[in-house]
Image: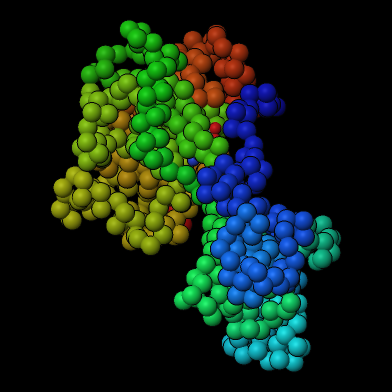
């Protein structure tokens, strides 16, 4: 039985917060939202905010300059400009709303049905959508305007119909991308109706892109509406901003301000909608944030502050050999990630080392920081991540003092790396031969025949029966176990002094796991390499390691030799992990027996 470790789950990550909260956390989002909220309030409360009837003519204020009574002055026929602008806000927003609702009501259900059902439904809907897009919208709008007495609402519904294909295509493509997901199949198997599946499981995927599209479409609808009114179509008695622009345009030379105010209102609104749309897209897609150089400096300064003057550090862990004698030595390593909620530290100042020829296990449950530690050594952190350390020694050199180029040279020579997922770490477009020989030629300066010879030798050494054939093969032609052996061959081909294996057996089935561990143990002894093996499994530790580092929530809770750890682990978390890992795990003897009898045959 496996002991549950639910009480040790790290919950510091927290929730990402509501969409609105994430939006207003960004300055551009907050400003755009604030401006739009103000515009909407003006539109909604126009009857109360407007000081005069927008159509009231008072000849005494004809072309009047701004004054206390008439904030923006009077127009050419003696109407209050501010009142017309305020009422114009309402009519412009209303027009945009009618157009968007029309486009939504037509485009989204059609896109859902086309994407979900495919076949004839998809073909017919796509054909109609393409047809709509090929029709010149302005001509139709002129015809509709002429036949409906320039009815504003009907014109905006027509604008909405021409905008529906945008929603249709967006919804259809989103549905197509989720239609084959396992959870949609599961809902089908569970007997849920199509309408329910679309309404519950699929629409949720479509909502975010639709919100973004609506922000952008609103701007376009306002632009079209203004364009129509500018042409004198759909103005009505209460002018939208477009109609005011038309009036202002006619007297642009003598009264330029009459054109300026509505143009400004329209420009600001459309700009705010565009900024809102693109900020929403950023927030919703949660693009991986990248740490800016400024943020990196800030984190480094904060980490320096955490170190009391004179004292070495506030780190966890310990070291066993002198820095220059170590294969790897980390001093006060911290890893930070930039997240939508701000920087988060995921490794909290750890110190550890590996002696030459030693096998060190880094153990901990998922999320404890094992991989981030290894990635920092290998300089493999993603762009959103950043580490700081007092020093990182690799084969007696502090790599934090080296240039990026020198560091990667050193890594290429001194460290071999075996990743978690063998298949995803081989490029499907290249043969195994190319992938094995490329680093030998580029980093180790071998000629093509030398590299080929070395690749064949290491493939044979890791137990590949027909190395010549494997060299010609593409990754998809290998089994998972063979792919992992190929990666091990690649890792040792350059004769590194340290081999780092990140959960090297996780993706393999249990029989192959035993063989791969056995191989690693043999290679480590044969090449006299230091081996760092990342695992969540104490069974692996028992099998292969000399010393073990136990990590939890980004800190080291215990470091000791394997014997003492199993005999009397000090930390309760270590004891819990040991119990969870070893219950039911195959014993060393069983694994050995298995390895002796089973030899994996290549396909
Ligand atoms: N790109 C990232 N952005 C933000 N946080 C991250 C990122 N990658 C990892 N983390 C966080 O860092 C912490 C440590 O992750 P790490 O991958 O080192 O865990 P691990 O112990 O190797 O787990 P596993 O065995 O599942 O690989 C986790 O809390 C994880 O959520």
Q: Which percent across, then down, holds residue 408?
A: 25, 39
Visible residue check, residue 41: yes
Question: Height in image: 588 above or below 462?
Answer: above
Q: Quadrant of residue 463?
A: top left
Q: Quadrant of residue 118?
A: bottom right
Q: Quadrant of residue 142?
A: bottom right
In this orientation, which residue lies closer to the viewer: 568 or 145?
145
Residue name at image x 30 percent, y 56 percent: 433
Visible residue check, residue 363: no
In this orientation, which residue lies closer to the viewer: 84 or 363?
84
Residue name at image x 25 percent, y 25 percent: 398
Residue name at image x 59 percent, y 22 percent: 577
- The residue positioned farthest toward the front in the image shown: 60
Residue name at image x 82 percent, y 61 percent: 196
Q: Which percent across, then down, holds residue 391?
A: 30, 22
- 559 horizontally vs 66: left or right: left
Rendered-image quadrant of the N terminus: top right
Q: Which percent across, then down, holds residue 367?
A: 55, 32
In this orientation, which residue lies closer to the viewer: 388 or 376?
388
Question: Height in image: 427 above or below 326?
Answer: below
Count of numbered marks = 0
- 6 horizontally vs 575: left or right: right
In this orientation, which residue lies closer to the viewer: 589 or 296?
296
Q: Which percent across, then down, holds residue 426?
A: 40, 53
Specify how the rendered protein is coloured.
rainbow
């Amino acid at each position: 039985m496996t002991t549950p470790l639910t009480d040790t789950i790290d919950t510091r990550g927290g929730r990402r917060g509501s969409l609105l909260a994430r939006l207003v956390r960004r300055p551009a989002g907050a400003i755009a939202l604030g401006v739009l909220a103000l515009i909407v309030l003006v539109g909604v409360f126009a009857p109360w905010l407007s000081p005069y009837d927008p159509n009231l003519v008072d000849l005494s204020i004809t072309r009047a300059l701004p004054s206390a009574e008439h904030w923006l002055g009077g127009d050419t026929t003696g109407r209050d400009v501010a009142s017309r602008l305020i009422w114009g806000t309402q009519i412009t927003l209303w027009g945009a709303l009618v157009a968007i609702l029309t486009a939504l009501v037509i485009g989204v259900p059609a896109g859902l049905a086309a994407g979900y059902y495919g076949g004839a439904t998809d073909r017919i809907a796509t054909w109609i959508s393409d047809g709509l897009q090929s029709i010149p919208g302005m001509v139709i709008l002129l015809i509709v305007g002429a036949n409906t007495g320039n009815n504003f609402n009907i014109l905006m519904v027509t604008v909405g119909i021409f905008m529906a294909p945008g929603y249709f295509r967006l919804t259809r493509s989103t549905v197509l991308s989720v239609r084959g997901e396992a959870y949609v199949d599961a809902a089908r198997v569970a007997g849920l109706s199509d309408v329910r599946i679309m309404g519950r499981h699929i629409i949720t995927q479509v909502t975010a892109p639709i919100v973004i599209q609506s922000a952008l479409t609103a701007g376009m609808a306002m632009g079209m509406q203004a364009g129509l009114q500018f042409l004198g179509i759909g103005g009505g008695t209460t002018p939208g901003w477009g109609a005011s622009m038309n009036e202002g345009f006619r007297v642009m030379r003598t009264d330029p301000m009459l054109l300026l105010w509505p143009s400004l209102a329209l420009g600001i609104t459309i700009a705010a909608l565009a900024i809102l749309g693109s900020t929403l897209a950023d927030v919703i897609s949660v693009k991986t944030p990248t740490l800016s150089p400024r943020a990196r400096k800030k984190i480094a300064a904060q980490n320096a502050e955490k170190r009391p003057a004179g004292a070495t550090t506030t780190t966890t862990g310990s070291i066993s050999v002198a820095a220059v004698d170590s294969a790897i030595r980390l001093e006060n390593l911290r890893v930070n990630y930039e997240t939508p909620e701000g920087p988060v530290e995921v490794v909290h100042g750890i110190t550890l080392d590996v002696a030459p020829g030693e096998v060190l296990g880094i153990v901990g449950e998922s999320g404890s920081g094992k991989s981030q530690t290894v990635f920092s050594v290998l300089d493999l952190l993603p762009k959103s991540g950043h580490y700081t350390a007092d020093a990182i020694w690799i084969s007696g050199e502090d790599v934090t003092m080296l240039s990026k180029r020198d560091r990667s040279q050193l890594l290429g020579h001194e460290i071999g790396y075996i990743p978690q997922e063998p298949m995803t770490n081989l490029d499907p477009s290249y043969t195994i031969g190319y992938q094995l020989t490329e680093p030998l030629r580029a980093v180790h300066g071998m000629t093509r025949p030398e590299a080929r010879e070395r690749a064949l030798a290491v493939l044979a050494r890791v137990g590949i029966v027909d190395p010549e054939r494997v060299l010609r093969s593409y990754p998809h032609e290998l089994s998972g176990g063979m792919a992992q052996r190929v990666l091990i061959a690649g890792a040792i081909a350059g004769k590194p002094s340290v081999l780092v294996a990140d959960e090297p057996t996780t993706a393999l089935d249990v029989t192959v796991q035993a063989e791969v561990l056995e191989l690693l143990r043999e290679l480590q002894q044969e090449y006299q390499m230091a081996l760092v093996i990342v695992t969540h499994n104490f069974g692996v530790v028992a099998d292969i390691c000399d010393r073990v580092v136990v990590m939890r929530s980004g800190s080291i809770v215990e470091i000791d030799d394997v014997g003492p750890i199993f005999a009397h682990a000090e930390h309760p978390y270590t004891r819990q992990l040991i119990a969870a890992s070893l219950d039911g795990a195959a014993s060393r003897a069983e694994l050995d027996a298995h390895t002796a009898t089973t030899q994996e045959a290549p396909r």
